[in-house]
Image (cartoon, helix red, strand yellow):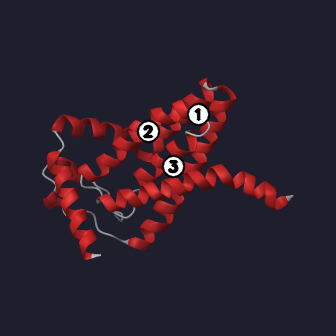
Amino acid sequence: MADLREVDGALTRRAAARIPAGVGKALSAVEESAESSKLWCGAAAVMAWKGGGRGRRAAAAGLAALAVAQLVSNGLCKQLAGRPRPPAEWIPHDEVADRPDSSSFPSGHTAAAVAFTAAVAPTWPAAGALCALPAAMVAVERVQSGAHYPSDVAAGAAIGLAGAWLARRAPALLLRHWR
């Protein structure tokens, strides 16, 4: 565990210091649009509106996965973990002042982004590919801004993948069980 903390700290300091200011601003803009899942809900609305049956199925799967991931990451894991955010002195820019007070572990933003993207992709691969870029940007921004350690983001991504798997498979599992 001590080795993980050391690597986590070194990667956090590196990401915060090495990402150019312009890139940091772009990452922040994408993260801000993803705040409270606005970006993913907007993407789901466009998919449902423009994508026909496939778009509606992709949007429904994405939103279901997002809900599962948010429930697990923010409703359960953050309450149990209680991990402090990276120290403010590690972050050499002003974004560190805009961090939440909640537990650092896991990254709920990353969980939501990965869940939505991973659930959409099997039904509509092109939409999933379009969502992958902002999802990756959200994950990077969470470390760059000092809001999370890389292990928080990795755990959020794992929760997002599990949420997508569950959201896509739960209907079939429930139908099989009720037959």
Q: For this rendering, which residue is in front, 83 or 156?
A: 156
Type of amino acid under label 1: Trp
Please give left or right for residue 54 compared with residue 116 in the image: right
Q: Position of residue 34 (x, y in %)?
A: 41, 42
Q: Please report whichever mark, 3 or 1, sits nearer to the chain's N-terminal start.
A: 3
Q: Secondary structure at mark 2?
A: helix
Total marks in image: 3
Please give left or right for residue 74 compared with residue 179 in the image: left
Q: Please report whichever mark, 2 or 1, sits nearer to the chain's N-terminal start.
A: 1
Whole-angstrom CA distance, mark 3 to mark 2, is: 11 Å
- Tell me if residue 2 comes above or below residue 168 in the rendering: below
- Tell me if residue 157 comes above or below residue 34 in the rendering: below
Type of amino acid under label 2: Ala
- Residue placed under numbered mark 2 in the picture: 132
- Residue placed under numbered mark 3 in the picture: 115
- Tell me if residue 4 comes above or below residue 62 in the rendering: below
Whole-angstrom CA distance, mark 2 to mark 1, is: 12 Å
Which quadrant of the rendered structure holds the C terminus?
A: bottom right
Q: Secondary structure at mark 1?
A: loop
- Tell me if residue 46 comes above or below residue 74 in the rendering: above
